[in-house]
Image (cartoon, rainbow, N blue to C red):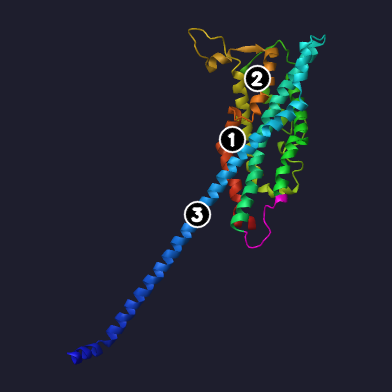
Amino acid sequence: MLSSTWNFIKRHKRKFIVAGALVGGVYLLGKYAQRKLQEMQEREAAEYIAQARRQFHFESNQRTCNMTVLSMLPTLREAIIHHLNAESLTALLKSKPTNKVEIWEDLKIISFTRSIVAVYSTCMLVVLLRVQLNIIGGYLYMDNSVTKNGTTPLAPPEVQQQYLSSIQHLLGDGLIELITVVKKAVQEVLGLVSLKQNLSLQDLEQHLTRVRRLVEDDCGSLKHRTLSWYMMPDEENTLADQNVKVFPDFNTVLNICLNRGFSRFLDNMAEFFRPPQQDSTPCSTPDSLSHVSLPLAKIIPIANGQIHSICSEIPSHFVQDLLMIDQVKEFAANVYETFSSPLDLQK
């Protein structure tokens, strides 16, 4: 039987060799495919972990942005009040001076100026901090995740300090220049409006639109630098050069914030324009508000007090509105993505 089996094998030797080669090839191919599948799974798992870690770092950075904005608002508020001291004028009015009308005229300009400046500077602070802290955050992510091979870190303490110190311009020279420009615009728009003149919310909105046009347009009667100058001392400096890729989006997002901010400012003012409630009309409607007007002298204290709502470290509707704008969140994500990507940094 052994001889017959051996003869069978000899007769079909070629077939057995081919079959063996096929079986061996299939086995090796299977092992190769298994190894490649395992490598792909490990790579996908590593990418998922890296993406999850990156997302966690980004979200943590946004919370830091929000807390930083809130922590800086008291400083901003005190700086505005220092340069636009309406409280000293109200104290003078209580002493019944002979130049009462003149003091009221000054109070009119200062009250509207400081509320408008508060809207501008708070919006600028929100958007500028989103840029600076997400650039730093992206660099720090790269330093912790990529550049651990002895290369120079992207965000050493001195670089972080350089970015954060640029905020001081908005609280210093930039704020003073902004106050000067806004005050001139307010004077031009409201200077000749009588203290006794009745104004509705629509009237206020129209006056506010005119002030914004004078402040924001280069072709108006007020010649001044663009809004970005109030946030950074020189658009051609090093930080601006590094941020050049985000400035177009920056201007768009800032304008969205300003529109939302001034809309919220008018909403806050509207609370004081509600008509006397009657049994037949228990609540006010937009149409009913449009028929309510107040003497400018009564509107001035309302406008004067808005700075405490606008620049509030306790999250107010004003600040929350700005922090929750979708375009602000998307903009922050784009900045972080740009500065936490090795390929973008190489470019």
Count all numbered tags in the image, as a single digit: 3
The residue that mark 2 highlights is 204
State which quarter of the image contains the C terminus: bottom right
The residue that mark 3 highlights is 49
* Label 2 close to label 3 by CB (< 8 Å): no
Q: Tell me if residue 214 comes above or below residue 56 in the rendering.
A: above
Any part of residue 331 in sight: no
Highlighted range, magenta: 147-158
Q: Tell me if residue 64 comes above or below residue 9 in the rendering.
A: above
What is the spatial separation of the Cα atoms under label 1 and label 3, in whole angstroms?
28 Å
Instruction: Say which of marks 2 and 3 sits in front.
Output: 3
Q: Position of residue 283 (x, y in %)?
A: 51, 14
- Residue 126's image quarter? top right
Q: Is residue 132 within the magenta segment?
A: no
**Residue 94 vs residue 177, the one in the foreground:** 94
What is the spatial separation of the Cα atoms under label 2 and label 1, in whole angstroms?
26 Å
Magenta stretch, main secondary structure, is loop
Label 1: state its secondary structure: helix
**226 left or right of 292?**
right
The residue that mark 1 highlights is 323
Any part of residue 299 in sight: yes
- Residue 25's image quarter? bottom left
Residue at image position (53%, 9%) is 277
- Which amino acid type is marked by label 3? Ile
**Residue 229 vs residue 121, the one in the foreground:** 121
Instruction: Say which of marks 1 and 3 sits in front.
Output: 3
Label 2: state its secondary structure: helix
